[in-house]
Amino acid sequence: MSDLIHYEDLPVGTVIDCGARHVSREEIIAFAEEFDPQPHHLDDAAANASMLKGLSASGWHTCAIMMKLMAENLAVKSASMGSPGIEEMRWMRPVRPGDTISLKGTVLSARVSKSRPEMGLVEIDWNISSEREQVASMRAIGLYGVRHPGKTR
Amino acid sequence: MYWEDIELGLRSDLGSYTFTEDEMIRFSRMWDPQPFHIDPEAAKSSFYGGIIASGWHVAAVWMKLMIAHGRKRAAEGIVSRGGVSPGFREMRWHQPTRPGMTLHYDSTTHEKVELKSRPEMGLIRSFNRGLDDAGKPVMSFIGQGFVQRRPK
């Protein structure tokens, strides 16, 4: 198990590159039809007339893309124990059909749980960007297994 | 309904949703492929002791029910003049969502913010929850939405 990324491998300042994913128009519409069927996620004419001035992905779709990149590039390669929640998610700019969304994280703080010394709490600032600009940011705590419980703070 | 018309402290019941194991696995295979979300055998030996829904699935269903609620209100003549959100805060997954669990969702308006940079819009913050059958929280977060101001 020690080849997996553990709490000890994620000290403050660590930068984590989780790769990128292309977002198609079909995927934007399919996600919105299932979970967020608002006109600005489904229909060009309605989207052009909206505050977002064009078809854009649901913010929850952006979260799902972020999670997929994080799961495939960090969580399954690590002793991840999930997450108790998200401090803040900011949807800053629309995600458009054809965008390639990349995910990078920087560790802000890290500590071992007082009640469960086998679990570490790692706070990460995530930057979600298209080729053009940052589209979202997220600050969240992830739970990671401690490689040497009792010997690590 | 303009920003000015929205009453604070108003709780909307958004209805209930039952998470089946098949649907949980389908969502997570696509968006959150961690063993405790997609592999019943691996999930048994995980921290969670069995398959659990992706927290993002639990949250996306809140959105789905919120839109359905808005449509029902629109059919009754109460049309919301909003829909775009700058994000959310304090998302908490209080307990795992396991196969067969039914969550009961609601949304309560709790803060109105004027926007200096966008005088034609106001921000509404709401406290949103998904509860289990016993009324205990499974998920909660503070949502935000831009709503049009009443034209002067």
Image (cartoon, rainbow, N blue to C red):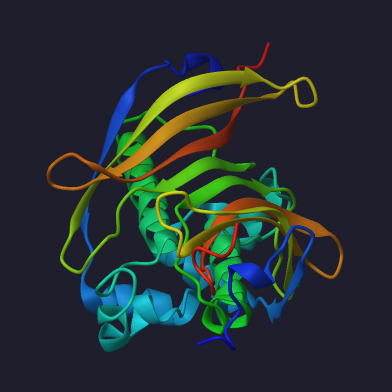
- The image shows residue A140, relative to residue A22, as above or below, that is above
Q: Residue at x 54, y 49 (%)?
A: A86
Above or below, B65 against B9 in this view is below
- Residue A90, position in %: x, y? 66, 46
The structure residue drawn at horizontal position 53% and vertical position 32%, both measured from the top left corner, is B81
Residue B84 seen from this side: no
The quarter in which the C terminus of chain B is drawn is top right
Which residue is at a point 77% across and 65% down the rendered structure image?
A14
From the viewer's side, name the closer residue of B5 and B126.
B126
In percent of width and height, residue A80 lies at: 50, 72
Whether residue A1 is visible to the viewer of this picture, yes or no, is yes
- In the picture as drawn, the residue positioned furthest to the right comes out as A132
Q: Is residue B149 left or right of residue B135?
A: right
Please give the name of the residue rendered at 64% of the width and 78% of the height, measured from the top-left corner. A24
User: B68 or A122, which lies in front?
Assistant: A122
Please name whichever residue, B48 or B110, is drawn nearer the observer in this view of the structure.
Answer: B48
Q: Position of residue B72 (x, y in %)?
A: 30, 41
